[in-house]
Image (cartoon, helix red, strand yellow):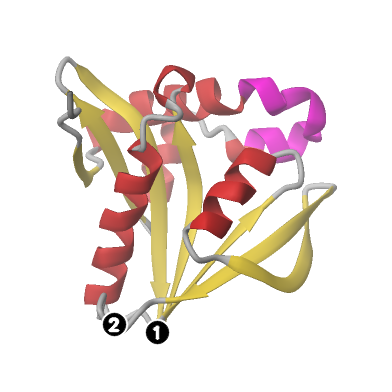
């Protein structure tokens, strides 16, 4: 049976649910994160509302559940950047992330983006595998994310998407 997944831009009222989704998805990684890196990843509702001021925050939902996944994006010229992908643990493995990523990539392509980047940390091996399966590869850039290495992954958007 197919699951009816809806992806839309988050509204201010969704901030608490987005925050709860981030917390549920990243809680198991807390011991592997520095305190500051974890706090920068798992946003409070107020921080989610602040993110909405400069990024597009998306949510995925299914009937009877408001927010089961989230992803934020920003645009700088022809480059899009993804941040804060999270799926509630009970919904992981149900292709929710694939659907969410596809919608966000389509929107970024429509906005003129030709290239996408994202940053991830080494504890997130499952996410890294997901990104690789979806065409992202390591760019070789590593920066400091509150005391943790942040590895950049990038991908070109296909001409089909633009």
Residue 78's mark?
1
Residue drawn at (39%, 82%) of the image = 114
SS at mark 2 in the image: loop
Q: Quadrant of residue 3?
A: top left
- The mark nearer the N terminus, 2 or 1, is 1
Q: Nearer the viewer, residue 1 or 70?
A: 1
Asked if the stretch drawn in magenta spans residue 33, the answer is yes
Reply above or below: 146 against 79: above
Region rendered in magenta: 27-39
Are discs 2 and 1 less than 8 Å apart at CB?
yes
- Measured from the top left, where is residue 160 in percent x and y? 25, 79
Number of marks in picture:
2
Residue 112's mark?
2
Q: Nearer the viewer, residue 140 or 83?
A: 140
Q: Is residue 137 left or right of residue 82?
A: right
Q: Nearer the viewer, residue 102 or 26?
A: 102
- Measured from the top left, where is residue 85 in percent x and y? 47, 43
Residue 107's mark?
none
How much space separates mark 2 and mark 1, taking CA atoms?
A: 6 Å
């Amino acid at each position: 049976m197919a699951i009816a997944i809806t992806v839309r831009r988050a509204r201010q009222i969704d901030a608490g649910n987005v925050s709860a989704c981030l917390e549920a998805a990243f809680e198991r990684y807390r011991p592997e994160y520095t305190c500051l890196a974890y706090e920068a990843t798992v946003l409070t509702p107020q921080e989610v509302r602040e993110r909405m001021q400069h990024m597009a925050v998306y949510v995925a939902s299914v009937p009877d559940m408001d927010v089961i996944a989230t992803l934020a994006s920003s645009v700088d010229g022809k480059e899009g950047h993804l941040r804060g992908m999270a799926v509630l643990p009970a919904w992981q493995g149900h292709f929710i992330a694939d659907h969410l990523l596809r919608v966000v990539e389509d929107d970024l392509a429509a906005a003129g983006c030709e290239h996408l980047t994202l940053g991830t940390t080494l504890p997130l091996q499952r996410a890294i595998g997901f990104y690789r399966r979806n065409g992202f590869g390591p760019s070789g850039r590593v920066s400091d994310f509150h005391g943790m290495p942040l590895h950049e992954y990038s991908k070109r958007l296909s001409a089909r998407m633009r």
